[in-house]
């Protein structure tokens, strides 16, 4: 089994595979949220206002 098949969920159906899959999902979600917060932090206050956010909203983001 390659790392690519693991990342695509190649261990489905086994106890350790399910745990590994859940861990990989959590890492991906954390990374996506981090990247989104970083991108939003680069926007000006005016740009944030245009999309209905303020700077304080960025830290409260919980993406799934």
Image: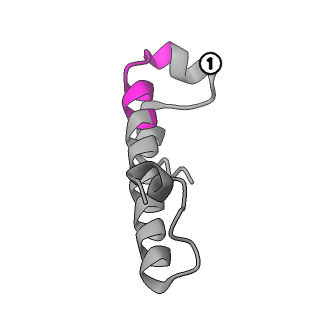
Q: In the figure, residue 1 lies in which quadrant?
A: bottom left
| Horizontal and vertical percent position of residue 43 | 44, 18
Considering only vertical position in the picture, is 24 above or below 52? Answer: below
Vertical arrangement, residue 59 with respect to residue 23, above or below = above
Where does the magenta region start and end?
A: 36-46
| Left or right position of 21 against 12 | left
Question: Element under label 1?
Answer: helix
Q: Main secondary structure of the magenta part?
A: helix
At x 58% / y 79%, what residue is drawn? 13
10 Å neighbourhood of mark 1: few (<14), some, or many (≥20)?
few
Front residue of 1 and 12: 1
Residue at image position (56%, 32%) is 53
Location of the C terminus by quadrant is bottom right
Residue shown at the point (42%, 26%) measured from the top left: 39
Is 47 rendered above or below residue 16? above
Of 29 and 15, the residue lying toward us: 15
Q: Residue furthest bottom?
A: 15
Locate residue 37, reporting x and y percent.
Answer: 41, 36
Q: What residue sits right under mark 1 in the picture?
A: 50
5 falls in the magenta region: no
């Amino acid at each position: 089994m390659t790392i690519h098949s693991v990342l695509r969920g190649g261990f489905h159906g086994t106890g350790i595979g399910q745990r590994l899959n859940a861990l990989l999902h959590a890492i991906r979600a954390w990374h996506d949220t981090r990247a989104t917060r970083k991108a939003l932090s680069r926007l000006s206050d005016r740009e944030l206002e245009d999309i209905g956010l303020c700077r304080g909203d960025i830290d409260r983001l919980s993406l799934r």
